[in-house]
Image (cartoon, rainbow, N blue to C red):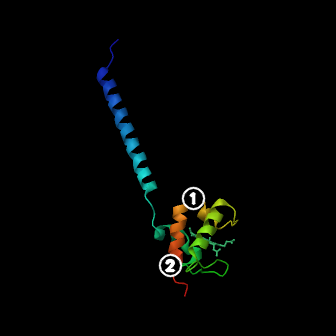
Amino acid sequence: MTVNICARKADKRNTVRGCCLILLCVFSVMVIAVEPKSPEQMVVSCVPCHGTNGISVHDTWPNLAGQDKHYLATQLKAFRDGTRKSAMMYPMAFDLTDKDIDDIAVYYNQLSCN
Ligand code: HEC
C-alpha cells in the first residue's frame, strides 16, 4: 500500500492556513468589539425617543438635554442593573459599561435644554 505523503502535507498546509484565517477573523472581530464608541455613536439608538438634541419627541418620554450628569448616570445604571424598572429603557441600557454611561451622561448634560 502506498501512502501519498504529498497529499498529506498539502492537507496539513491547508489546515494551518485555515486556522490562521479563522484566527485572523476572530482577532479582527475582537478589535472591532473593543474599539471604544463615541457618545455620538452610542446615542444614535436613543434619538427616536429622546430626540436628536436630547429634547424628547413625545410627552411620555423625558428630556435629557442639560440634565445633571450624575443624575443621568445614576438612572442609566439603575435601568441597566434593573433597580429602576422600565421595559423601554432596560434593553437600551443592559449592555452599557460604566464608562459608556458616564460618557453618555456628559454628552446629554452638555446639550442645551432651551
Ligand atoms: C423606545 C423609546 C426609548 C429609547 C429608544 C430610549 N429611551 Fe430612555 N427613556 C424612555 C422612557 C419611556 C423613559 C422613562 C422610563 C420610566 O421611568 O419608566 C426613559 C428614561 C430615560 C432616562 C431617565 C430620565 C429621567 O429623567 O429620569 C435616561 C437617562 C434615558 N432614558 C437615557 C436613554 C439613553 C441614553 C438611550 C439610548 C442609549 C435611551 N434612553 C433610549 C424611552 C426610551
Q: Which mark is residue 81?
A: none
Q: Quadrant of the N terminus?
A: top left
Q: Where does label 2 land, which residue?
A: 110
Height in image: 6 above or below 14?
above
Crowding at dot 2, Cα within 10 Å, few <14 / some 14-19 / many 20+, comes out as: some
Of labels 1 and 2, earlier in sequence is 1
Crowding at dot 1, Cα within 10 Å, few <14 / some 14-19 / many 20+, comes out as: few
Q: Which mark is residue 95?
A: 1
Check disc 2 and report its element: helix, strand or loop: helix
Residues under labels 1 and 2: Cα distance? 23 Å
Residue 80: percent from left, percent from top: 63, 61
Height in image: 4 above or below 21?
above
Residue 16: percent from left, percent from top: 35, 34
Pick the residue in front: 49 or 110. 110
- Decide if residue 97 is on the left or right side of residue 12: right
- Based on the displayed image, in which of its 4 quarters is residue 23 positioned? top left
Residue at horizontal 37%, vertical 33%?
A: 15
- Decide if residue 3 is on the left or right side of residue 82: left
- Decide if residue 42 is on the left or right side of residue 6: right
Pick the residue in front: 106 or 61. 106
Residue 37: percent from left, percent from top: 46, 63
